[in-house]
């Protein structure tokens, strides 16, 4: 009995070990940590061997079609299960029975045709459930979520989702987020959402105004933030159905990718103004078909609660014809924060600016405001309470005019005019009297002058190609100088109250103890990504400095020094920068010298061993190889091509050529002096002459061996004619030649002279 028990335990352990090995082969990340990432592994099923050690299991982007009861049986400590983007069409009812600790379940973008309550019956800890992008048309007759008492966020719906029934959401009382994708939702039973007492953020993507109206009626007092996506507000007759929205207690309304027209805007404005608790309205990526010529008068009571208005990427096709918004001016006086970003705003009418009596924050970034239009927008009496203004990424170009236009804003404290193209900066400018924060980064200013106001506490002039900083700013606490061309730290005397400075990505190579200690109140200095030369004095100074909360010097951007100084958890004193980090210029110079020497040696070796000659010959030979091995008979023009040295021309021309060309029958010879084509490359002339001749006659002598062009001719004959294994080459020894005098690279010539008959003179 004891033996059988041991054997059974052994078999179980062996089986478990085998499954774990298989799991590691399928998902290498599993086993080592609590995170098991099997995403995008082309899996057709959930792998075996999953254990209770795993808390996060990612099986997304595979081809899983079915989840079986035993697949997740051992993963009792699982907190996160990601199954999105598979082909799951069926799930056994007790597949998730052991997942009592599961907090997030993602089944989105699969092929589930129905949602079963049995799946979620034991998921008592589930907080986040994603079911969107499947194939179900409804949620069944009852509530699939009745046992999910801790559910916090729910995302459901798909293109086929068409029906919501009463009771589908029984058991859910509180939700942080409810997202419904109901583009084709056509049937909604009133009261279906009545059981939900509170929803902090509800996202609705529904085309039917009738269905949307019915949903809002059920959630009048439940939703805090209502986000409407892709809803077309284009039919005036349907706007009456939205009147119920004016009774909602929602504090924030967001419209995303909505369609508005001149005919529907007045009714929407009226509805929003009547909402009793509305604080914020947001419009993102919406389209307005019209020019602001409202077809009916906007009749609305000014909201006493609305304070925040955000408009981003509002598309108005004929924006240049848009009106001055006189119809809504009276509704905006209580707004405290307005953002109109990336909407092609080129002017804010002065009358509208004067109506914004309570406005404290205004963001007009990424628009088309110019110097003249800004002067009109910030007119006398406009924006009287404004404290923060963002005009970055506009079309401003005159800094003096910009400052003068904004000097009327008596309460302005913060000004961002970055990413405009100012270029030149004057010596004197007017600014708001209480301005404390100024952002002039990326404005193409070449230098800083006394135009910068003395009242500043924070100044950002990053990315401006500045080469020096010598301004007197007695109240300045933060200074941002990154991405410039500074070679030294700014002087401390003109900025005595500086607490933090960023001088990253400049051209600093060192700074002295005196320069550093002059900043009495400095708490943070970021000087990383510079060209520091870590001399003994500089390293010692950085390692032993005190009285500063944090210094970032970087060799390069590597050492983060705190007090006591540490490098990513290691004491700076224990860190020894490499030679490259300390002496970059010296190392680069040495490398350049070594590279030059190597090139010089290669050139010398190449010259001695005729490397260039070999390369040129190889190229010519490759060209010759591409031609037919034998020229057609009609292209043969000569009986022989004569290859000889110029020093042997007297014998060749007066004796050999005369004898052969006056013979009976006469031979037609090809001589380079007489028959080469003028203007043609010599190598091409040689190749063509050899190919157009029956034979190649070499007049060998000591002069021949020393001649460069004779070598070419011999080589081409060697490459082209000898490769054909024929007797096209005829050798004539004009004088005895030592075998050592024949270049070793002409091995076939040596072989022929040793094995075949050649002629000797006389």
Image (spheres, rainbow, N blue to C red):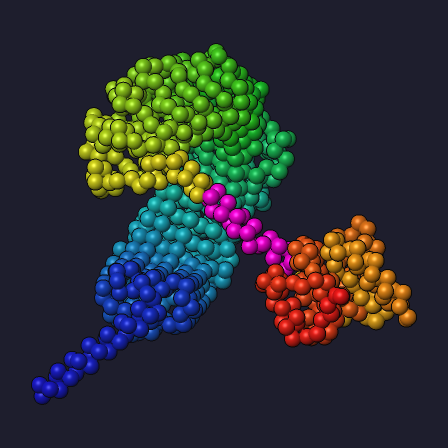
Residue 338 image point, x, y percent: 45, 30
What's the residue at 74%, 53% (across, down)?
Answer: 647
Question: For the magenta stretch, what is the residue range?
Answer: 595-620
Q: Is residue 627 above or below residue 366?
A: below
Secondary structure mostly seen in magenta is: helix
Q: Quadrant of residue 10?
A: bottom left
Residue 641 vs residue 476: left or right?
Answer: right
Query: Who is closer to the viewer here, 487 or 697?
Result: 697
Nearer to the camera, 91 or 739: 739
Image quadrant holding the C terminus, namely bottom right
Residue extending furthest toward the bottom:
1
Q: Residue at x 36, y 20 (%)?
A: 490
Q: Residue 276's spot in the image, x, y percent?
A: 39, 35
Q: Residue at x 75, y 65 (%)?
A: 761
Please state the horizontal and vertical placement of residue 294, each as a whole percent of the image: 60, 33
Residue 554 lies, in percent from the top left, at 32, 36
The N terminus, quarter of image: bottom left
Specify whether residue 613 is painted magenta. Answer: yes
Quadrant assignment, res 594: top left
Can you see residue 103?
Answer: yes
Does residue 585 appear left or right of residue 364 in this picture? Answer: left
Residue 672 visible? The answer is: no
Residue 494 vs residue 206: left or right?
left
Q: Judge whether 1 appears above or below 370 on screen.
A: below
Tell whether position 394 is magenta: no
Residue drawn at x 34%, y 14% is 494
Q: Viewer-proximal residue, 109 or 153?
A: 109
As drawn, which residue projects farthest toward the left?
2
Q: Nearer the viewer, residue 566 or 67?
A: 566
């Amino acid at each position: 009995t004891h033996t059988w028990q041991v054997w059974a335990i052994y078999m179980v352990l062996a089986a478990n070990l085998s499954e774990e090995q298989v799991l590691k082969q399928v998902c290498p990340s599993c086993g080592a940590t609590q995170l098991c990432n099997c995403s995008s592994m082309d899996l057709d099923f959930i792998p075996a061997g999953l254990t209770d050690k795993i808390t996060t299991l990612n099986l997304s982007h595979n081809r899983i079609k079915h989840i079986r009861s035993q697949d997740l049986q051992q993963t009792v400590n699982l907190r996160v299960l990601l199954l999105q983007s598979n082909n799951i069409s069926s799930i056994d009812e007790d597949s998730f029975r052991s997942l009592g600790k599961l907090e997030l379940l993602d089944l989105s973008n699969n092929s589930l045709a129905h949602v079963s309550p049995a799946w979620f019956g034991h998921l008592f800890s589930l907080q986040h459930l994603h079911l969107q992008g499947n194939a179900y048309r409804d949620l069944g007759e009852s509530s699939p979520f009745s046992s999910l008492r801790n559910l916090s966020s729910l995302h459901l719906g798909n293109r086929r989702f068409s029906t919501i029934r009463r009771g589908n959401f029984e058991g859910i009382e509180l939700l942080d987020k409810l997202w419904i994708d109901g583009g084709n939702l056509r049937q909604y039973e009133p009261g279906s959402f009545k059981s939900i007492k509170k929803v902090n953020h509800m996202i609705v993507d529904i085309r039917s105004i009738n269905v949307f109206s019915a949903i809002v009626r059920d959630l009048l007092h439940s939703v805090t933030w209502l986000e409407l996506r892709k809803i077309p507000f284009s039919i005036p007759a349907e706007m009456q159905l939205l009147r119920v929205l004016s009774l909602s207690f929602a504090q924030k309304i967001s419209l995303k990718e909505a369609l508005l027209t001149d005919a529907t805007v007045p009714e929407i404005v009226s509805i929003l103004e009547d909402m009793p608790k509305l604080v914020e309205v947001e419009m993102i990526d919406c389209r307005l078909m019209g020019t602001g010529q409202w077809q009916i008068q906007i009749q609305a009571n000014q909201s006493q609660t609305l304070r925040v208005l955000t408009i981003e990427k509002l598309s108005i096709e004929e924006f240049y014809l848009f009106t001055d918004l006189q119809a809504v001016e009276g509704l905006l006086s209580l707004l405290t924060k307005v953002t109109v970003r990336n909407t092609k705003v080129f002017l804010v009418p002065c009358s509208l600016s004067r109506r914004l009596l309570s406005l404290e924050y205004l963001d007009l970034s990424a628009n088309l405001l110019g110097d003249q239009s800004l002067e009109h927008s910030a007119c006398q009496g406009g924006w009287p309470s404004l404290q923060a203004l963002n005009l970055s990424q506009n079309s401003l170009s005159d800094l003096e005019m910009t400052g003068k236009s904004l000097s009327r804003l008596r309460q302005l404290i913060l000004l961002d005019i970055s990413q405009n193209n100012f270029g030149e900066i004057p010596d004197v400018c007017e600014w708001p009297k209480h301005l404390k924060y100024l952002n002039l980064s990326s404005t193409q200013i070449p230098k800083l002058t006394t135009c910068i106001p003395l009242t500043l506490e924070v100044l950002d002039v990053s990315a401006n190609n500045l080469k020096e900083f010598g301004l007197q700013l007695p109240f300045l606490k933060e200074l941002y100088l990154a991405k410039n061309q500074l070679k030294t730290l700014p002087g401390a005397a003109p900025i005595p109250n500086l607490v933090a400075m960023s001088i990253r990505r400049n051209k600093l190579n060192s700074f002295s103890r005196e320069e550093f200690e002059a900043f009495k109140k400095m708490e943070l200095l970021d000087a990383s990504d510079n060209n520091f030369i870590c001399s003994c004095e500089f390293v010692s100074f950085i390692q032993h400095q005190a009285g500063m909360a944090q210094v970032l010097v970087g060799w390069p951007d590597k050492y983060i020094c705190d007090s006591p100084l540490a490098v990513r958890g290691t004491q700076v004193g224990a860190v020894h920068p490499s030679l490259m980090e300390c002496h970059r210029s010296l190392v680069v110079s040495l490398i350049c010298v070594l590279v030059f020497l190597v090139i010089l040696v290669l050139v010398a070796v190449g010259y001695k061993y005729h490397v260039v000659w070999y390369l040129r010959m190889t190229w010519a030979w490759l060209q010759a190889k591409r031609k037919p091995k034998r020229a057609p008979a009609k292209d043969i023009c000569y009986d022989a091509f004569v290859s000889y040295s110029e020093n042997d021309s007297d014998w060749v021309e007066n004796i050999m050529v005369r004898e052969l060309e006056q013979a009976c029958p006469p031979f037609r010879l090809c001589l380079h002096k007489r028959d080469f084509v003028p203007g043609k490359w010599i190598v091409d002339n040689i190749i063509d002459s050899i190919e157009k001749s029956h034979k190649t006659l070499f007049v060998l002598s000591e002069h021949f061996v020393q001649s460069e062009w004779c070598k070419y001719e011999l080589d081409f004959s060697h490459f082209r004619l000898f490769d054909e294994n024929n007797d096209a080459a005829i050798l004539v020894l004009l004088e005895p030649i030592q075998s050592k005098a024949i270049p070793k690279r002409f091995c076939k010539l040596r072989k022929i002279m040793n094995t075949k008959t050649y002629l000797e003179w006389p």
